[in-house]
Image (cartoon, rainbow, N blue to C red):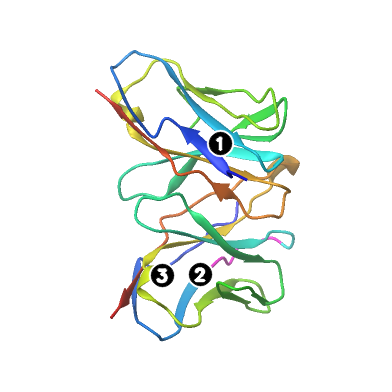
Amino acid sequence: DAKTTQPTSMDCAEGRAANLPCNHSTISGNEYVYWYRQIHSQGPQYIIHGLKNNETNEMASLIITEDRKSSTLILPHATLRDTAVYYCIVRVAPSGTYKYIFGTGTRLKVLA
Amino acid sequence: NAGVTQTPKFQVLKTGQSMTLQCAQDMNHEYMSWYRQDPGMGLRLIHYSVGAGITDQGEVPNGYNVSRSTTEDFPLRLLSAAPSQTSVYFCASSYGTVDGYTFGSGTRLTVV
């Protein structure tokens, strides 16, 4: 199963871009990278996912390196409400079934 | 759409009692999962289902049973509650194998 490595914590100034890195050097060719966040003790919230190409939606952008061994989640203009734990996940697919394995994530603190 | 609904939101059990955590989704999602989250930790997968009548074990299945008789419902049963099962339980669902998960708001369980 592909594992992910993320920094434990990061700070970002309000209004600036928040760049959250993730290492997934053992990712397989057909495995997607997903990002979720969890605010306080709420249920995790899906942000974005990608396979090879960079992706963008209304919440964030996902930049995946050409060798797919790492990725970066970008929140273009961080606000105080973006303070949360961010999880980078590689979807594992043993035996044709699919499940997520969560790590401990990056605790992002947006500073006023 | 209500999304993913979990009941109850809070529960206190005595050691040895049994109970069922309910999870229902109204989005016609095929994929459903149960996770537990302990203080300061990421989410750990308990059981998951890829469709009605099909379930499989995750990382920490011991002490829990699941069934999936309908697409909408995915209840989690604690057979004989133990203090080690004190945790926050999240249910999640997704439409397909690539789509992101929608999480419920969680059930906070305390076993005394």
**Measured from the top left, where is residue A65 in percent x and y?**
63, 78
Circle 3: residue type: Asp
Q: Is residue B10 visible to the viewer in this orientation of the structure?
A: yes
Q: Quadrant of the C terminus of chain A?
A: bottom left
Using the image, tell me which numbered label, if any, was put on residue B58.
1
The answer to whether dots 2 and 1 both sit on one chain is no
Using the image, tell me which numbered label, if any, was put on residue A22.
2
Relative height, residue B12 to residue B107 (above, below)? above
- The chain under label 3 reads A
**Measured from the top left, where is residue A41 in percent x and y?**
36, 50
Q: Classify residue A90 as left or right of residue A28.
A: left
Relative depth, front residue between B82 and A41: A41
Relative height, residue A108 to residue A92 (above, below)? below
Disc 1 is placed on an element classified as: loop
Query: In the image, is residue B77 part of the stretch drawn in magenta?
Result: no
First in sequence: mark 3 vs mark 2: 2
Q: Residues within 10 Å of mark 1 (few under 14, many from 20)?
A: some
Q: Is residue B59 visible to the viewer in this orientation of the structure?
A: no
